[in-house]
Amino acid sequence: MSEFSSSFHLRTERPQDAIDLLQNAGSTGFVFPETNGWVTFLADGPAFHMEDSIISYNPGILIHYTYMEDHGWSLQIYSKDDLVFDYKCDWTDELVIEKGEFDLDLLRELIIRQGNSAEGLEAIFELDESSYHFEAPPAYVIAQKLGLGYYEWLSSDNIGNGEHYDNIVAVK
């Protein structure tokens, strides 16, 4: 079975901020413990869709991360309700890369803030037909560089009632 992951990551040390965001947006879901200054959460609904209500109530830096092992990956970063980074890579049939807002300086700053190296950052986003069969998926490399603690095999479609995770909060 292939991995399908889609998660949100709010730049905060307070899980309550993500709970408030979900509640203000009129959404339900799950909020994970803080890791490295990020609080991961899942919003119920279509896993690979960014709800406008979540964007409109976003209090700061918010990442929407998706990875579909056999298909591609994407990374969107919002500053409040502004999309400041937008990258999509699809290799379902042929390699297609879309760069909307593509601010590598912002991404580099977030990575360095974690104490991680941003060396070779450009290469992660410049795949070609011969390089997208990789040992470490680019999506994983970016998630690790950003310090995201929860991202593997994680989406609203596969979390169930959250029983396999410690210390998560169900937001109803």
Image: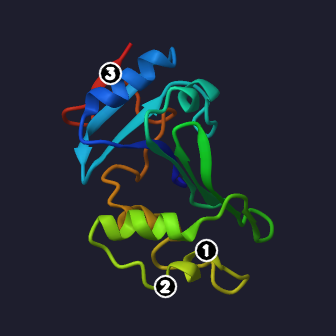
Q: Nearer the viewer, residue 7 or 20?
A: 20
Q: Determine which quarter of the picture holds residue 54.
A: top right
Where residue 85 appears, x then y in whole percent? 60, 56
From the image, tell me which residue sits under label 3.
170
- Whether residue 97 is visible to the viewer of this picture, yes or no, is yes
- The crowding category of the residue bearing disc 2, from other C-alpha atoms within 10 Å (few below 14, some 14 to 19, many at least 20), is few
Where residue 47 appears, x then y in whole percent? 57, 36
Identity of the residue drawn at 61% across and 29% down: 51
From the image, tell me which residue sits under label 1.
125
Per the model, the C-alpha gap separating discs 3 and 1 is: 34 Å
Horizontal arrangement in the rendering, residue 155 relative to residue 85 (left or right): left
Q: Nearer the viewer, residue 107 or 150?
A: 107
Where residue 37 appears, x then y in whole percent? 27, 50
Horizontal arrangement in the rendering, residue 75 relative to residue 91 (left or right): left
Q: Earlier in the sequence, mark 2 or mark 1?
A: 2
Per the model, the C-alpha gap separating discs 2 and 3 is: 38 Å
Label 1 near label 2: C-beta < 8 Å? Answer: no
Label 1 near label 3: C-beta < 8 Å? Answer: no
Q: Nearer the viewer, residue 60 or 155?
A: 60
Q: How many marks?
A: 3
Q: Amino acid at mark 3?
A: Ala
Where residue 170 appears, x then y in whole percent? 32, 21
- Whether residue 163 is visible to the viewer of this picture, yes or no, is no
Q: Secondary structure at mark 3?
A: strand
Q: Amino acid at mark 1?
A: Phe
Q: Secondary structure at mark 1?
A: helix
Q: Earlier in the sequence, mark 3 or mark 1?
A: 1
Per the model, the C-alpha gap separating discs 2 and 1 is: 10 Å
Q: Amino acid at mark 2?
A: Gly
- The crowding category of the residue bearing disc 3, from other C-alpha atoms within 10 Å (few below 14, some 14 to 19, many at least 20), is some
